[in-house]
Image: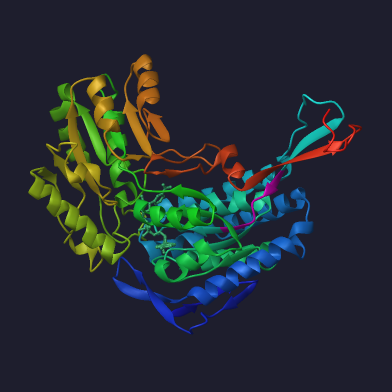
Amino acid sequence: MQNHPMYIDGRSVDAASGEWFDSFNPFTGEPWARIAKGGAADADAAVKAAHRALTSGPWPQMTASQRGMLLHRLGELIARDARRLAEVEVQDNGKLIAEMHGQLNYVPQWYYYFGGLADKIQGAVIPLDKKGYFNYTRHEPVGVCVAITAWNSPLLLTAYKLAPALAAGCTVVVKPSEFTSVSTLEFVKLVEEAGFPPGVVNVVTGFGKDVGPTLVEHPLVAKIAFTGSSATGRTINEQAAKHFKRCTLELGGKSPNIVFDDAKLEDAVNGAVSGIFAATGQTCIAGSRLLLQESIHDAFLDKLLALAKTARMGNPMSPDTQIGPITTRPQYEKVLGYIDIAKQEGAQVRLGGGPATRPECGRGWFVEPTVFSGVKNSMRIAQEEVFGPVLSVIPFKDEEEAVAIANDIRFGLGAGVWTSDIGRAFRMSERIQSGTVWVNTYRVVSYMSPFGGYKDSGLGRENGMDAIREYLQTKSVWINTGAATGNPFVLR
Ligand code: NAD
């Protein structure tokens, strides 16, 4: 097993404690890499390095165009190494090699897009109500940012944060999930190769409870960009609020995928199946509540079950595999726990409903693709995020009821609407409370389009023009061009 040290101030370093922890391959259930077990001292060193790089040395002297060129170069290096990085991800998080190849080939676009945006950040000249003054705005980097990521798509979630932060001129400490740190440590070697000065990007590994509070509460940190569970997001937001730090939070979801009887049913079946079983359901935007109009409920469900039954499970490294393992042992147990809860609540198992014991699953952490019908929206299986291949099917009568069920939840990340009625598509898109609505499609994202949550699904936006504003602060500059500066004690 290879040891993977952290990356602080342009150097590979062991944890101050000298300790390591294991990262597991979810297909074999065995440890495959050893990661430096960072603590408060390492987090502090990384933040200080990022602050030095922000305030001295080459980074603050660079023009925005030069920053953009570095980002572009980084994108090219990721494209060069996409295959290798994808294979690392699969070993660490068990996602399908086909999906990871697609994802890693797409990740460079974030660095190209935000690299291009770096020198297009413009202030404004403000038309004033006063004579004798000139007033303009500057958009300046917020400062040192901490990027904390979840285990499901480490390098994509890092790109969401790092690309706009660097384009804005910030410096960054990245903290990957303790379950999937290897790809971020491999990626940061490309950051160095691209020519970013030491300290501009740092990676601290370790458990959230050990390094998280130091990173979040550090007085030299200006902003936290977090992807993870709503529970951790709440803790981070509370800690950050104490120090008036900015936060973007990309949190959990329980997204409704709503099928009306006027939809193209074959497309909707494909969309519903990929909405929940792609990535083994381990995505924040999983369409985990399938709302079916009563008139098509039974026929649609039959088609969906027929398709879901054909899914091939097995080694995620094999290009033929369609459903892989659950990434972490605790998550595997959590998914099985929710299946039990749903059964106790009276939901009917229509497919799966337990661990996968097929021979091709070996000793990996596999759960059978599971479909529950007869789910009421008030049940825990409908209200709480499972983050696994478990679908809850809920019937509805009409548009009014579909909207009511869709919105009766604390989350608001994504939603799908399947209909051939253009008016209904617009009405539903307006009424659903979520950061993204997909009509007659599901799960499409782009570096160009803002992404984020309503309600408990998060704060702020990643991707697109909205994202770079999250890493900038506006300064208003007043120049006296001829106004008299009178004696303040003489009333005029
Ligand atoms: P998690 O909240 O357990 O951990 C996320 C990260 O936070 C990890 O790096 C962890 O080490 C760190 N962390 C834990 N405690 C911390 C603390 N006290 N201070 C600072 N950092 C701390 O989430 P997870 O299990 O890794 O990821 C799954 C969750 O992520 C799901 O809820 C999913 O919906 C969500 N997610 C959201 C999006 C989105 O864009 N909205 C994308 C992917 C995943």
Indicate left or right for 344 with 416 as reference: left
- Residue extending farthest to the bottom is 18
Image coordinates of residue 334 in percent, x first then y, are: 23, 58
- Colour pattern of the rendering: rainbow
- Chief secondary structure of the magenta portion: strand
Left or right? Give the position of 458 relative to 492: left
Asked where in the image residue 7 lies, by quadrant, the reply is bottom right
Task: Answer whether residue 140 is magenta in the image.
Answer: yes
Query: Can you tell which quarter of the image residue 380 is in?
Result: top left
How many numbered marks are there? 0
Give the residue drawn at x 52%, y 36%: 449
Res 56 visible = yes
Q: Dividing the image into four quarters, tell me where ligand 1 lies.
A: bottom left
Q: For residue 163: magenta?
A: no
Up-down relation of residue 395 to residue 339 (above or below): above
Residue closer to the observer: 246 or 378: 246
The residue drawn where x is 46% and y is 49% is: 249
Region of the chain picked out in magenta, as a range = 139-145
State the image coordinates of residue 476 (x, y, percent, origin top left): 73, 39
Q: Who is closer to the viewer here, 211 or 102?
A: 211
Q: Which x, y percent locates residue 32?
A: 38, 75
Which quadrant is the C terminus positioned in?
top right
> Is any part of residue 196 visible from this angle?
no
From the viewer's perspective, is 480 left or right of 285?
right
